[in-house]
Image (tube, grey):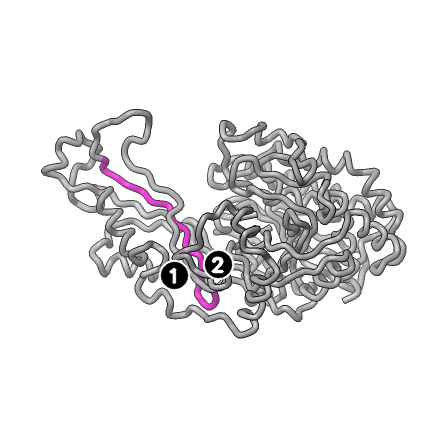
Amino acid sequence: MSNKGADRRGLLLMAGAAGVALTAPRLAFAAGPYGGDLTGVRAAIDRQQPEAIKRLQDWIALPSSAAEQRNVQEGAQYMAGLLKSAGFQSASIIQTDGSPGVFAVMDNGAPRTVGMYFMYDVKQFNPAEWSSPPLEGRVVDRPGIGKVMIGRGAVNQKGPQATFLAALHALRAAGRKPPVNIVLVAEGEEEIASPHFPQIVRRPEVLAALGKCKEVWMPSAAQSTSGGVTIDLGAKGVVELEMTCSDKAWGRGAVNDIHSSYKAMLDSPVWRLIKALNTLVSEDGNDPAIDGWFEHVKPLTARQKEIIADQAMRTPEAEMKKEMGVQHWVRDLPYREALERLASQPTVNIEGMYAGYIGPGGKTVLPSKAVAKLDLRLVPDQTAKDAAAKLKAHLAKRGFGDIDVNVTGGYDPTQTDEHSSLIRSSIEVYRAAGLDPQLSPRVAGSWPGYIFTDAPVSLPAGHFGLGHGAGAHAPNEYYVIESTAPKLRGMAGATQGYVEFLYALAAT
């Protein structure tokens, strides 16, 4: 997130806008503009902060990974328990053909009902690559930012979600009901492209509950390190897949790995897979070359180009390159053109490849199988189903029909109108906090928002949240607990922001 630094969900969230000192939002919060005098809620947030931090650490200690089939049932049960303890009257576990989901309802007797999306799964991790244990949730000092919690899932997505739950706890402790009713759906397969999420959302009882909502949103640590905020109006779709070339399916070479000296008389599935992969992209590897790939690609509108031009003016190119660790944009494009390409272009990316021996030293072997893991990013009006079909047809046309294409997950792009209630409320709360949010046509990463924006749900969907984190999918993923940066909110300030946002939605 999905939340969605240079993460899968947040490549453009680093684009910074002007911010305010950490103390300023507290004054604005106490005086309004949403919900009247909420000083008591802020006091509850501060009082419960140790409890909120411990809740996040405990959640990080239970990693759920669909890719590894690790703690999938336990993760769903834990998710349901967290929701019930935060005040949801019901939180039921929904089994699917993959990992289970959670469907929860909080009826506060309010006139307005809002939808929410959570995920309880996390990416895989190698503890040897981390500066502190990835399941410990250790709080450490990070120069220029403050105290951060390091752990797998810290920002993607447990930190922002736990912070929202802290807002519900604080409202209850202050003797207030949330000003809206909440319908929440959670899944445990977001990190493998949500293959079974439709089985959760499209159940009759879930669709009926979402039918009462005006929008669906996901908590997000949306501030850059400089404190700025970008509101994404959409996200790219994605297809995740594996391509496997084997001698057995090919009908050539040896059916098992064999001594490499026989290469002179035997074919190699590794080289064949490389040849097949080369047909998928342009000579420099940067443009998809799959037959018919651009058939349904919708160009950027004049308004979207205007938004990107504003991004380019407001976010220094040097700052973005530094935060991402970038040396050059593709083909040395000018900054604005690189941003337009990021928003508008579908991609074919090799996540990883493996074949034969990859241990220390050499091992003279001719592998009998090679595998490549790919992700395909999609833009409106592409669909995941059509993209997968085009890939398979492209390979078959070139004589690679025996290469197995196993689609492990995927979903369509999503788009939300900037004049929707969700976006207008987000802008209002950010501005009330003294921030000047900027818009982005769509985040370059993906989240399954299409399930909400497309029929039959057909609602605006997106993200909201103050606070900051980075390193999703990478070692040393972190989430800011206490900020020393004057324009950046820590966990307590982000908790406050969620309370403000609920009141803004109630008033919309």
Say whether marks 2 and 1 touch (CB < 8 Å): yes
Report the side of 341 relative to 82 (left or right). Answer: left
Please indicate, yes or no, whether residue 443 appears anywhere in the rendered image: yes
Relative image position of residue 396 (x, y in whole percent): 24, 58
Q: Which amino acid does label 1 sit on?
A: Ala
Q: In which quarter of the image is residue 73?
A: top right
At a point 59% along the width and 52% down the height, the residue shown is 14
- Specify start and end residues of the magenta stretch as a single range: 367-387
Q: What residue type is labelled 2?
A: Gly
At a point 66% along the width and 42% down the height, the residue shown is 159
Q: Nearer the viewer, residue 331 or 500?
A: 331
At a point 21% along the width and 28% down the height, the residue shown is 364
From the image, tell me which residue sits under label 2.
237
Relative image position of residue 128 (x, y in whole percent): 49, 27
For marks 2 and 1, give the CA distance.
10 Å
From the image, tell me which residue sits under label 1.
387
What is the tally of numbered marks visible in this picture? 2
Secondary structure, mark 1, is helix
Q: Does the magenta stretch include residue 381?
A: yes
Please indicate, yes or no, whether residue 94 appears anywhere in the rendered image: no
